[in-house]
Amino acid sequence: MDESFTSLPSSHLLGSVPAVVSEEKKPTNHEVPEAKLQIFPPANRADRGHGYQALDDSPNGGDEQPATNNWKGVLSISSYKQYFNVDTDIVVDRIISSLNPTSGNFFDKIETNPDLYGMVWISTTLVFLLASLGNCATYLMQKRSSNSTSWSFDVSYVNLAACVLYGYALVVPVAFYFLLQYLGSNASLLRFWCMWGYSLFIFIPTSFLLIIPVEFIRWIIIILTAAASSTFVALNLKSYIQGNDLMLVVVASFALQVAMALFIKISFFP
C-alpha cells in the first residue's frame, strides 16, 4: 500500500471509531439530576417541603416500626404485641398452675414475661360458655319439673356475662394496684391482670359440670371451685406482699373471688 494513504488521519473517516479520550465531565446547566424513587403521599414533615417522601428516607430507618413510647402508642396495636408474646406451652403451664394453688408462686413464673393473653381469651371463652351453658342448665331444670317446657335462649345472659367478667378482670386488679400503692407496697398492674385472668380459668370446666340438674351437686361443685380459685389468688397475693402487714388485702381478694363464684352460680345456674 502506498505510504501516503497510511498517514491520513482516520478519526474523520466514515465508520471509524474515535479513540476514547478520558475527559472530565463538565456539568451543564441543563443536566438532569439522578432520579430517585418516591412514594405517595408526601411526608408530613416541615424539613421535606412539599415533595414526595423518599423510600429510603423514613424517620425510623428502613424496617423499623414507628416508635410507641409516647401517648399515641396506646392506640397502636403494635404496642401490645409484647404482652401476647407467649406460646402454647407457656399458657398451658400457667393454666395448670392456676388449677393447683399449692404448685408454687405464680408471680415467679410470670416475672420475666407477664401476659394478657390469658386474661383476654379466658374471659372471652367464659363469657360465651356461661351464656350458652347457663341457658342449657336453666332449660334442664325447668324440664325436670315440667315436661311442657319449651327451649328458649335468653340473650341477656351474654350481656350480663360480658359486663361482669370483663369488668371483674379489668377493674379488680386495678383497684388492688392502687390500694397497694397507697399503702406503700410496690405493685405491678400487668402482673395483677395476668394473675387474675388465669384465676378465672377454673370456672370454664366448672361451667360444664354445673349443667347437672341436681341442685345439691351444683352447690358442692361451686363451693370447691370457689375455694380453689380464691386460695390461688390469696396465696399468690400474700407472697407478693410478703413482709408487709397487709393481711386485710389478702382477705379482701379471697372474698371477692368467692363472690364471683357465687354470682356465677346464682345468675347463670339458678
Image (tube, helix red, strand yellow):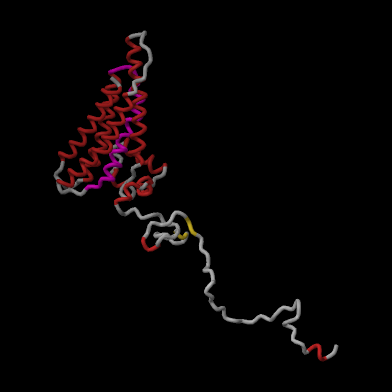
Q: Residue furthest front?
A: 29
The residue sitting at 34% across, 25% down in the picture is 131
Q: Does the magenta stretch include residue 114?
A: no
The residue sitting at 39% across, 45% down in the picture is 86
Report whether residue 4 is seen. Answer: yes
Where's the N terminus, which quadrant?
A: bottom right
Point out residue 219 in the picture as x, y percentages from the top left corner.
27, 22
Point out residue 15 in the picture as x, y percentages from the top left corner.
75, 76
Point out residue 37 in the picture as x, y percentages from the top left corner.
51, 60
Which stretch is magenta? 187-215
Closer to us: 100 or 175: 175
Q: Does 97 appear above or below 55?
A: above
Q: Is residue 204 magenta?
A: yes
Q: Does 211 appear above or below 27?
A: above
The residue sitting at 21% across, 34% down in the picture is 254
* Residue 69 horizontal side relative to residue 43, left or right: left
* Residue 130 horizontal side relative to residue 13, left or right: left
Closer to us: 44 or 200: 44
The residue sitting at 36% across, 23% down in the picture is 133
Where's the C terminus, which quadrant?
A: top left
